Image (tube, rainbow, N blue to C red):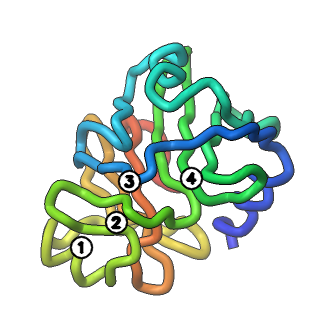
Amino acid sequence: MKLLVSAAAILATASVAGAKPPPAGVLVPGRSLGGLRLGMAPAQVRAAWGPDFGRCRSCRYRTWYYNYAGFSPKGAGVEFRQGRVAAIFTLWSPSSWHTPRRLRIGDPVGRLTQVYGALPRVECGGYYALTQPGQVTTAYYVREERIWGFGLSRAEVSACR
């Protein structure tokens, strides 16, 4: 399962020293996740979420992990390309994250369809993403028919994490 492999990579490669994303992040579809926006510079991410984060040593692109507890996979990640945020995503289903329309991580996938309508599905291996495509792709990660996480990415960046 790609999700479990990703978690193992996080635990094996991230050096986390008290880094934390927001305790109750909000996904504003097509705009922001946890207060971060695509295109932000690393200094802006540090100013918003703090200077302590784990760095992925095996990722193709510079990726920072902000975890709620050291060496625990729950939290959020930020991927940079060409010095700017290209993707923002939650990790391991952090509770209290939601959308302005009150879709929450942990909700049944049917709630997503009620709130946002039918969305295109992207298979990610072990889980899938329901996406709202556009210049900014909004991803709702689904595992075992529950909302597992949220993500935002530039259109040319894979929704799968």
Please name whichever residue, 17 or 2, is drawn nearer the observer in this view of the structure: 17
Q: x%, y% of residue 147? A: 39, 73
Around disc 4, counting alpha carbons within 10 Å, would you say few (fewer than 14), some (14 to 19), or many (20 or more)? many
Q: CA distance from mark 1 to mark 3?
A: 19 Å
Look at label 2 and name its amino acid: Leu
**Residue 112's disc number:** 1
In the picture, which quadrant includes the N terminus? bottom right
> Residue 40 sits in which quadrant?
top left
Q: Say whether marks 3 and 2 touch (CB < 8 Å).
A: no
N-terminal-most mark, 3 or 2 = 3
In the image, taking residue 113 as reference, residue 63 lies left or right, namely right
Say which label, 1 or 3, has the lower sequence index: 3
Of the residues under marks 3 and 4, which one precedes in the sequence? 3
Of residues 32 and 15, the one nearer the viewer is 15
Marks 3 and 2, Cα distance to the nearest angstrom? 22 Å
Q: CA distance from mark 4 to mark 2?
A: 20 Å
Q: Earlier in the sequence, mark 4 or mark 2?
A: 4
Secondary element under disc 2, as helix, strand or loop, is: strand
Q: Position of residue 6 (x, y in %)?
A: 70, 58
Q: Is residue 109 left or right of residue 78?
A: left
Label 1 with label 2: CB-CB less than 8 Å: yes
Please identify, in this view, whether the residue under mark 4 or under mark 2 is nearer the observer: 4
Q: Residue beneath label 2, please?
A: 130
Q: Nearer the viewer, mark 3 or mark 2?
A: 3
Q: Residue at x 23, y 46 (%)?
A: 28
Q: Left of 113 or right of it: where is 62?
A: right
Which label lies toward us, 3 or 4?
3
Reading the image, the residue beneath label 3 is: 24
Upstream in sequence: badge 4 or badge 1:
4
The residue sitting at the right extreme is 12
